[in-house]
């Protein structure tokens, strides 16, 4: 059952063009690695890029790493288990694969060892199902590695990075199945299939198909918070907000695009999609960094906002529009995305793409920005306090002038109006408005 469901998710591709009211930015993505079924891109602490190829039919994909921001790649010598997610856990990078396998690396992705936790679930999941069992939900929380099983086993944690495991309370995760057959052996109640584990306000939240839970650290039981999760499987953190998206089609104006919590799941707010996503609320990936929030849709479109959804910009130019983004990560210079296609498609479009962060648009002039007394205009020259990279945008978000490593920018050729400046150095980024 899990294998069939997993294949349906992997092959469900919506061919659409979602322009809405968002603006397409001029910068284009470039493909830096071709993979038949790209699943992961991960930026290691030292800057290495790590990718994985999701060849779940014959396990011929594997893990790759790059030491030059994706210009060249090396395939790792590690058994392939169709690794679906990677996280940083202490000194280790952990890659979760099928068959209850975890690969871990202590040298930024160059070498790996494989561990297996299937023995923790043999009392609850059949041997046939364990072969395909996977952890989409994995997190490092308060020096413990947590894995939430997709097949009804429950949630386990390790204090030694996967060497040994402890099972959290299963009873508090059980629900009445009614007429639905349980995946757990000899059990008349079921446990949800889990898609995400995420921290907010010092608490660990667990997201399934139906339910959202919070961990009680005193006794490792789970408190039910919501029963309307509806595949809320992706998340990113902006300031104190854990922002979550649903990996399911709604096509309903009333459906929330993104939801967020700042108090460990006790209360929730919405980030409206307005017309930006044309009612397609199937969010396959969320990512945040110092620039803002990125939302990748099932249809292949990626949106960007630097004002928490007041303005969204389509930054999908250069991406294959019919293929889904699955993971977005970033370093100080680039955004990276893994674009997925099915293993049997022989795709040349699937792979890893990158996008220069210096070319990201800024919000419109209707958005509150950080005006700065040390930035001013005199005699058609824009002055800044010290040398920096200066970008200037018009009210539509188009770049109209730029200079690198300077404290002045000549704007004599620009028409009168309101402009948005972006000043970046190695350690800071300042935006604001000027008038000419």
Image (cartoon, rainbow, N blue to C red):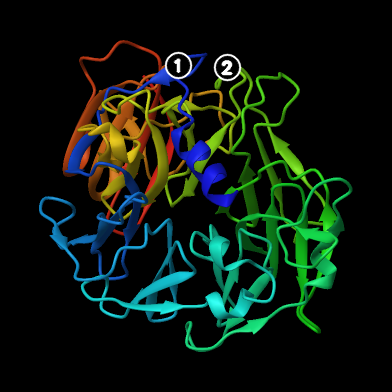
- Whichever of callouts 2 and 1 sits on the residue coming sooner in the sequence is 1
Residue 383 in sight: no
Q: Which residue is rendered at x = 54% and y = 27% of the image?
A: 311
- Position above or below: 281 against 81: above
Horizontal arrangement in the rendering, residue 334 relative to residue 309 (left or right): left
Q: Where is residue 214 shown, x and y percent of the image?
A: 77, 65
Q: Which element carries disc 1, helix, strand or loop?
A: loop
Front one among 298 and 384:
298
Residue 323: image location, x then y, percent: 37, 29
Residues packed near mark 1 inside 10 Å, few (<14), some (14 to 19) or many (20 plus)? some
The residue closer to the viewer here, 27 or 342, is 342
Q: Quadrant of the C terminus?
A: top left
Residue picked out by circle 2 = 278
**Mark 2 touches mark 1? (CB < 8 Å):** yes
Q: Left or right: 201 with respect to 147? A: right
Give the number of the mark in front: 2 or 1.
1
**Residue of label 1:** 16
Tell me: residue 340, above or below residue 111. above
Asked whether 425 or 269 is in front, the reply is 269
> For the residues marked 2 and 1, what is the alpha-carbon distance in whole angstroms?
10 Å
* Dot 2: element: loop
């Amino acid at each position: 059952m899990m294998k069939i469901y997993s294949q349906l998710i992997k092959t469900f591709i919506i061919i659409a063009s979602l322009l809405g009211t968002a603006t397409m930015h001029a910068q284009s993505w470039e493909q830096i690695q071709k993979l038949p079924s790209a699943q992961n891109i991960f930026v290691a602490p030292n800057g290495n890029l790590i990718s994985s190829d999701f060849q779940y039919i014959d396990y011929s994909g594997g893990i790759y790493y790059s030491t030059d921001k994706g210009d060249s790649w090396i395939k790792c010598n590690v058994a392939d288990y169709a690794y679906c997610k990677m996280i940083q856990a202490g000194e280790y990078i952990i890659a979760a694969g099928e068959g209850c396998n975890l690969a871990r690396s202590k040298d930024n992705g160059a070498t790996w060892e494989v561990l297996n936790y299937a023995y923790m679930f043999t009392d609850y999941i059949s041997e046939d199902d364990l072969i395909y069992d996977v952890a989409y939900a994995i997190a490092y929380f308060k020096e413990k590695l947590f894995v939430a099983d997709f097949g009804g086993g429950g949630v386990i944690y390790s204090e030694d990075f996967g060497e040994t495991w402890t099972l959290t309370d299963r009873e508090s995760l059980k629900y009445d199945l009614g007429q639905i057959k349980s995946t757990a052996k000899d059990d008349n109640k079921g446990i949800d299939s889990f898609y995400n584990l995420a921290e907010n306000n010092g608490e660990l939240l667990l997201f399934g198909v139906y339910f959202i839970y919070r961990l009680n650290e005193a006794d490792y039981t789970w408190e039910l918070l919501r029963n309307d999760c509806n595949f809320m499987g992706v998340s990113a953190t902006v300031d104190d907000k854990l922002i979550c998206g649903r990996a399911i089609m709604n096509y309903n104006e009333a459906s929330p695009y993104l939801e967020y919590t700042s108090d460990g799941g006790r209360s929730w707010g919405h980030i409206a999609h307005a017309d930006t996503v044309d009612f397609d609320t199937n969010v396959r990936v969320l990512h945040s960094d110092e620039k803002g929030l990125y939302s990748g849709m099932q249809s292949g479109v990626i949106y960007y906002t630097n004002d928490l959804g007041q303005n969204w910009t389509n930054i999908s130019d250069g991406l294959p529009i019919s293929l889904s983004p699955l993971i977005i990560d970033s370093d100080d210079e680039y955004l990276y995305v893994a674009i997925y296609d099915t293993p049997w498609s022989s795709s040349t479009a699937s792979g890893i793409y990158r996008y220069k962060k210096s070319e990201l648009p800024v919000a419109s002039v209707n958005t509150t920005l950080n005006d700065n007394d040390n930035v001013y205009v005199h005699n058609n020259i824009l002055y800044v306090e010290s040398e920096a990279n200066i970008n200037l945008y018009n009210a539509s978000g188009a770049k109209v002038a730029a200079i690198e490593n300077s404290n002045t920018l000549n704007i004599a050729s620009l028409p009168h109006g309101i402009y948005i400046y972006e000043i970046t150095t190695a350690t800071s980024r300042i935006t604001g408005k000027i008038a000419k």
